[in-house]
């Protein structure tokens, strides 16, 4: 019988988690920043904010994109329910466009046919690790004045036309659930090249809190003056999860021929999806 999922946990992962448990920061500590820096190596340098799950990542991404009541989100029906449910949670109307028969990914023409003046976001899903048609979807989103989101829960480490997943959409979401390529048990992340989108995502994941004076050297919840500048939720990544994933990423880099490289092929799947 096929197992639901089977993760490979190395002794170095166990030791990395134990190291965090012996330290002061169980959540949102310095290991989280290190994990996010490690993730950015896989997105071609696009910065990431880590969160508690792929579902939280989608929620945070939609908030960063400004999704609200009355907006429409066009996406694929061939996905996990979270892709649509998190948009509906914000009051958006979800419109399902058909997928391409060869990849199972959102069909750009079908997405374009559903665009209206209310379309705020188009969300592609990289089904089974295969990146969607981002150049075409970028054009559809641009013409619609919509934000392009990539639900890359399955595809960290994949590439499209030699460009890494994480650099292809305005906002990209990852999941680190045990059935995914890299796991933190529960976990996720949002990648965005646009500093304004990234800032909105980072603020929302931690109740909209802003530290005064700002300091990137201090973990997010260190003592100091903090102001609540917008609504938000607690979706920050636990430090022990981040630490174990950093260790896993390092091991994965080593097994994936010495680390990230996007120079071959046109569309390439992540190491875990390759046969
Ligand atoms: C395509 C897709 N998006 C989002 C998610 C949600 O991720 P998580 O389980 O980490 O909340 C999943 C998880 O199965 C998924 O497959």
Image (tube, rainbow, N blue to C red):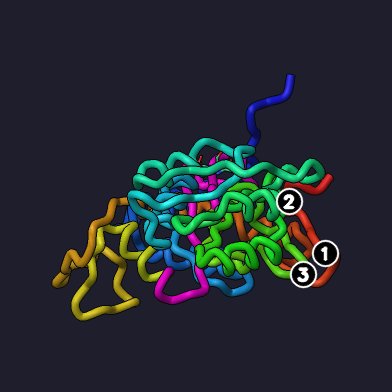
* Percent coordinates x, y for residue 177 in the rendering: 54, 42
Q: Residue at x 57, y 39 (%)?
A: 178
Looking at the picture, tell me which residue is in the foreground, 49 or 248.
49
Q: In this view of the protein, can residue 121 be seen by the observer?
A: yes
* Percent coordinates x, y for residue 252 in the rendering: 68, 56
Which quadrant does ligand 1 occupy? top right
Q: Earlier in the sequence, mark 2 or mark 1?
A: 2
- Determine which quarter of the picture holds residue 275: top right
SS under mark 2:
loop
For this orientation, the residue located farthest to the left is: 225
User: From the viewer's perspective, is residue 226 above or below residue 249?
Assistant: below
* Percent coordinates x, y for residue 268 in the rendering: 79, 58
User: From the viewer's perspective, is residue 30 above or below residue 232?
Assistant: below
Q: Is mark 3 within 8 Å of ligand 1?
A: no
Q: Are marks 2 and 3 in contact (CB under 8 Å)?
A: no
**Residue underneath mark 1:** 266
The Cα–Cα distance between marks 2 and 1, rounded to whole angstroms, is 11 Å
Magenta segment, principal secondary structure? Answer: loop
Magenta residue span: 174-197
Q: Residue at x 70, y 66 (%)?
A: 135
**Residue underneath mark 2:** 130
Q: Earlier in the sequence, mark 3 or mark 1?
A: 3
Q: Residue at x 63, y 55 (%)?
A: 112
**Residue underneath mark 3:** 162
């Amino acid at each position: 019988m096929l197992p639901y999922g089977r993760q490979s946990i190395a002794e170095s992962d166990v030791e990395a988690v134990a190291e965090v448990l012996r330290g002061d920061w169980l959540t949102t500590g310095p290991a989280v920043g290190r994990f996010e820096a490690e993730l950015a190596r896989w997105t071609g340098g696009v910065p990431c904010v880590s969160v508690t799950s792929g579902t939280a990542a989608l929620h945070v991404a939609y908030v960063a994109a400004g999704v609200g009541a009355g907006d429409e989100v066009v996406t694929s029906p061939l996905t996990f329910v979270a892709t649509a449910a998190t948009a509906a949670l914000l009051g958006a109307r979800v419109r399902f466009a058909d997928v391409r028969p060869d990849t199972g990914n959102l069909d750009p023409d079908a997405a374009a046919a559903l665009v209206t003046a209310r379309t705020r976001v188009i969300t592609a899903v990289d089904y089974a690790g295969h990146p969607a048609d981002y150049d075409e979807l970028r054009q559809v989103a641009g013409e619609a004045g919509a934000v392009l989101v990539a639900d890359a829960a399955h595809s960290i480490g994949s590439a499209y036309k030699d460009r890494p997943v994480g650099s292809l959409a305005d906002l990209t979401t990852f999941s680190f659930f045990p059935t995914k390529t890299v796991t933190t048990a529960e976990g996720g992340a949002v990648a965005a090249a646009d500093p304004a989108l990234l800032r909105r995502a980072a603020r929302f994941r931690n109740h909209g809190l802003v530290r005064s004076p700002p300091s990137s050297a201090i973990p997010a919840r260190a003592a100091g003056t903090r102001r609540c500048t917008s609504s938000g939720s607690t979706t920050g990544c636990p430090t022990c999860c981040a630490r174990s994933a950093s260790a896993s990423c390092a091991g994965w880099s080593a097994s994936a021929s010495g680390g990230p490289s996007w120079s071959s092929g046109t569309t390439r799947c992540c190491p875990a999806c390759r046969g």
